[in-house]
Every structure is written in structure tokens, then in C-alpha cells.
Amino acid sequence: MVEQELLALIQQIQTRGCEEQTTEVKTARGGCPERLYDTISAFANQDSGGVFVFGLDEKNGFKKVGVYDPQDLQKKVMEYCEQMTPVVRPVFTVCNEGELVFVSAEIPPTDLTDRPCFKTAKGRLNGSYVRVGDADKPMTEYEVYSYEAFRKKYRDDIRPVERASFASLDRSLVSAYLERKKRDRPNLETIPIEQLYELTGITRDGQITMTALLLFGLYPQAYFPQLSINATCIPSKEMGVVDDMGNRFADTKHIEGTLTDMLKEALAFVRKNMRVATRIDAETGERVDIPQYPMDAVREAILNALVHRDYSFCTEGMPIQLLMYSDRLEISNPGGLYGRLTVDQLGKAQPDTRNPVLVTAMETLGETENRYSGIPTIRYAAKKLCLPEPQFLDSRSKFTVTLYNATNVETVTPAEAPAVLYGDEKGLIPFCRTPRSRAEILEHLAFSSSQYALRRYLHPLLQAGVIRMTNPDKPRSPNQKYYTAEGI
């Protein structure tokens, strides 16, 4: 910064009367302050960096007192910075106001691949700090590990699972998965089965992987009891407040199983516990039910939590949290945003992928599109119902999606109600009022992956009974057609 910017920053600090996330005030009237390491580390470990401002007395209302010797002060601060790993190179600015001299030291952010920045003598685990408001807090073991995992590209989604064997898996699910893999990859047909297991991430060095257990396990929680979803319905806007009957929770469930199982059960829990507003169409006299949350957005939020959570040994004891408050739905997963992605870039930039094998497998199974469309889908679904903007909160240890419920249901038209209630954003319900073949449905959906399109958009409507088969006894019949049930 230039001198005028430093003077403006000093004025801002005095006006607000506080330090902030990116500013730290030190007196430096009688000499260079001690213990600058913590703040240097904290500033270097945040994307915005930070600024020391020397020459204000925080204990005396940030009064201007000036520094003892600007040249010696810069030298001492540089010595502090050289005792960090990696070494920090501050940028100094010196200005004066009358006889008082002020100094700033801008601490640039350390590149993500070099974090955490820590005091060399204390070591990475004990010498790394993060900035929380105007305070410097020691990094947790997991926060340190998360940087290490990105830097060294750890593959926790395919780490071997001790004690697990093929007897732990549903072999029919494994076989069906491999058949799908080979469908568009003829070269896989000639590969020996053991090698195919390794290539597809089912085994690693002959051992069952985390991905295989999570997708095909008979009971994954036998090995990792907390790799699950804790779903809770709370009758108020905050935890701990009881309802008129003295209940803290209106409903609670510990959801287990494979990722697919947990996704279905979590969606069922939300449907069961959310309120549904009813309105009568003035023209037709028909009843229209509008749920609190657009289920398409709920599905994407839960799915993202399942496939993008951290599956390292540091977080294997932490379940996903699904909390339904009276005014909002919060879904939190262990592990913050991975790599260089920031909250502002969600849905706009292609992210680094924490669990690439797991995500690819879920795409093969037709559960996810893997085109980075989840966040835009969540935002669009909320906007369509005129709901408040969904909130995305990231820390190094946790990522939370907050959906606010429908408080303005009168803006939803009867024509939009099926899409909201059943997650039919592609309009299959009106499209199938005339019986349609698979080919016609796929052409209507306009997706390159036919398996994904059918599993994602058609199958949930079949399970809900709103779309039916003309020949239900032969679901795979080439002459099969699909039609919208009466009354929908």
C-alpha cells in the first residue's frame, strides 16, 4: 500500500474501534512487539493475507503513538518472517503524521500448495494458526492434515479398509457396476477380473477400498459406524428450545447403509417432516400442495454431502448432520471445500475433486451427473419458488448448505406445483400425459448419459407412483411406455 492508504487504514481502525480479520494493531512504541509468529502464520494461511499496523495503542482506544524506530522495526519483523516455513516476505509501508511515524507490514497469502505456514521451531502441527475474527487460533490436527492431503494428493476414497473382504460386499451390485463400466469400454472385457477390480477402484493392492465399501457394502457401518447421516427435526429456530409438549426434537433418525441407501432415506426423512402448504386453484377448484423445500435442491445438497465429504481417518468418526429447523434446513458434512475452490466460485469454476473415484463411480451408477451442476440446481430451485438465496458456509473442517423454507408459497403457480412437490424439474409429468417410450423420454431430457437421465429423473417419479408403466410386469420390455397417473 502507499502512504495515503496506510493513513486511511489507520483512520478506519480508529473509527471502528477494533481489529479485524485482516488487520492486527501493535503499539511498537517501546520496541518491536514479541510473539508475532502466531499472527504471521494466521495471515499467511488465509487467502486474503493480512496487515500489521504499528503505532496505535489498542488499550487506549487506538490512540496514535507512533513507533520507536521504523528502520529497526522493519528489520525485526523481517527476522520473525524468516523463521517461518515457508519463509514469508512482508511488504512494508512507512508514513508519518507530524512527528509520529507509523509502519505497516503486509503479509501475503502463502500458496495453497505450501500451506500451512508455521513457525519452523514449533513444527507444522504446533506452529500453524488460523485467523478467527481478530484472534489467532491454533490449527486443529485435521486442518493441518487437510492441507497435507491436497498438497500430496491423498486418495482417501480408495484407501484400503482393514478387515473388509469381498464377503463384506454385495457381489450382485459389484457385478452390475462392472457390467456398466464395460458397456461403453469394450477394452475392459479382456482384462482379468483381479486387474479390473484394481482399475475400477474396487480394490487397491488387493484390499477392498473405501469406495467399494460405501457403494456395495452389505453394511458399511460395521467398519465405520459414524460414516452415516444424523437427521434431526427441531421444532424451533435454534437447538435446545423445546416445543409446547417439552420435546427438544420432533423426529430424529440415524441413517445408515450404502451411499444410495442413505440418499433415499434422507430424502424420505425430509419429506416426512417438512410441512406442506395447501391452496385451492381459483379456476379449477383443485387442491395444490406446496412443500417447504424444493426436493430437487434437497437431493443435490444431500448428494453433495455424501460424495464430497472427507473420508480420511481424521473424519471417519464424524457423521453428516441434517438439521430441520422451523425456518431452514441445514446439511453439514465433514471437510470444507477442497483445493483452491472458494464459496464465491461455487457453480462457476471447475473444482478440484476430493474423491474422484467415488464421484466417477456414482456417475456410472446414475446417481450423479458429475458436471458440477449441483450448486446451480440448488440456487435455481430456490429462486423458482422465490425463496431466500441458499447459504453456503465453508471452513477447513466443515461445509454447510442452508436452505430456507417456503414462506411465500402464493408465488407458486399450480402448473409449477408438480415440479416442486416431486422434483420434476424436467417436466416429465406433463410430458407423459401422453404415454411415452424410453427413447422419447431421453430425447425430451436431452442428456448424453441415458443411464443417468433415467435414474435421476424418471425412476424417482416411478417410485413415487406419479408416473407408471403400461406393462409393469415386464419393466424391460422394448415396447414399454410410461404415462402420468390419473389425478396428478
Image (cartoon, rainbow, N blue to C red):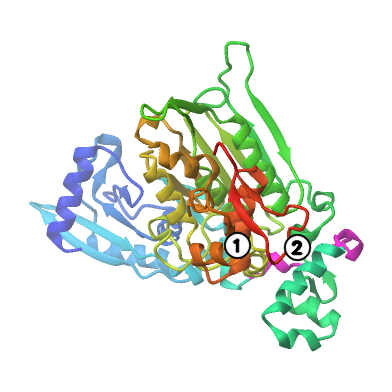
Does residue 400 sit above or below 174 in this rendering? above
In screen coordinates, is 83 left or right of 50?
right
448 inside magenta stretch: no
Is residue 175 visible from the viewing direction of this image?
A: yes
Please name the residue shown 74% across and 46% down the image.
226
Please name the residue shown 47% across and 40% down the image.
403
Callout 1, which amino acid? Ser
Image quadrant occupied by the C terminus: top right
In screen coordinates, is 81 left or right of 234?
left
In screen coordinates, is 219 left or right of 323?
right
Q: Residues within 10 Å of mark 2 (few under 14, many from 20)?
A: many
Please name the residue shown 31% across and 56% down the image.
51
* Residue extent of the magenta highlight: 154-170
Farthest residue, direction left: 98
Whichever of callouts 1 and 2 sits on the residue coming sooner in the sequence is 2
Instruction: Point out residue 164 in the picture as x, y percentages from the top left corner.
Output: 87, 61
Is residue 161 visible from the viewing direction of this image?
A: no
Instruction: Point out residue 433 in the picture as x, y percentages from the top left corner.
Output: 52, 49
Q: Which residue is mark 2?
A: 210
160 inside magenta stretch: yes
Callout 2, which amino acid? Met
In screen coordinates, is 370 left or right of 462?
left
Marks 1 and 2, how far apart in space?
A: 38 Å
Q: Secondary structure at mark 1?
A: strand
> Which sits in the foreground, 172 or 17?
172
Instruction: Point out residue 374 in the picture as x, y percentages from the top left corner.
Output: 50, 57
Q: Which residue is mark 1?
A: 437
* Overall secondary structure of the magenta section: loop
> Which sits in the foreground, 469 or 182?
469
